Amino acid sequence: MKSTAGPATASTKSPTRGSAFRLLPADPQDVLPPSGSKAQGTTRRVPTDPDTVERDLIKLVLTIVELLRQLMERQALQRVDAGDLTEEQEERLGATLMILHERMVELCARHDLSMQDLNLDLGPLGTLLPPSE
């Protein structure tokens, strides 16, 4: 006898899946008024300055690249500690990571940024990047 039950839906698979976007309550000023009613103010937006948008974009891109660079460096150190690499691979990996770090410093200098400028403050979570050594 064939089962008539269809594939599991999102609501039957996991109760948290349907409520993933309801984890944090919205601030009252962020909630749109019901359709048909007049808005009592303007919608909150991220403040942008046309004069700094290019620099802000460069800062964001460099921050993401630096985060990835640090993750790659940690992974490389784990591989070295585990003994997964030959001595030659370790040397090549170390030289590559040093060159990559130098290029990041150069890019920051070219755009009048410091490496500390790339470390975004995430409020109660702390900073995006770990403290530099």
Image (cartoon, rainbow, N blue to C red):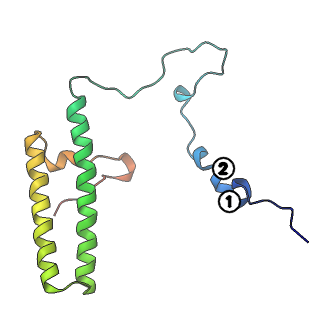
Q: Position of residue 124 (x, y in %)?
A: 39, 49
Q: Which circle marks residue 18 in the picture?
A: 2
Residue farthest along the top direction in this orientation: 38
Amino acid type, callout 2: Gly
Q: Name the residue beneath numbered marker 1.
A: 14
Q: CA distance from mark 2 to mark 1?
A: 8 Å
Q: Give the quarter of the figure containing the C terminus.
A: bottom left
**Up-down relation of residue 114 to residue 83 (above or below):** above
Helix, strand or loop for disc 1: loop
Who's the residue at 25% across and 37% down the image? 57
Who's the residue at 58% across and 25% down the image? 32
Who's the residue at 24% across and 52% down the image? 65
Q: Position of residue 92 (x, y in %)?
A: 12, 75
The answer to whether residue 3 is left or right of residue 15 is right
Helix, strand or loop for disc 2: helix
**Up-down relation of residue 6 to residue 1 (above or below):** above
Residue farthest along the right direction in this orientation: 1
- Mark 2 touches mark 1? (CB < 8 Å): yes
**Up-down relation of residue 44 to residue 66 (above or below):** above
For the residue pair 60 and 29, the one nearer the viewer reads as 60
Who's the residue at 72% across and 54% down the image? 11
**Residue 99 visible in the current orientation:** yes
Amino acid type, callout 1: Ser
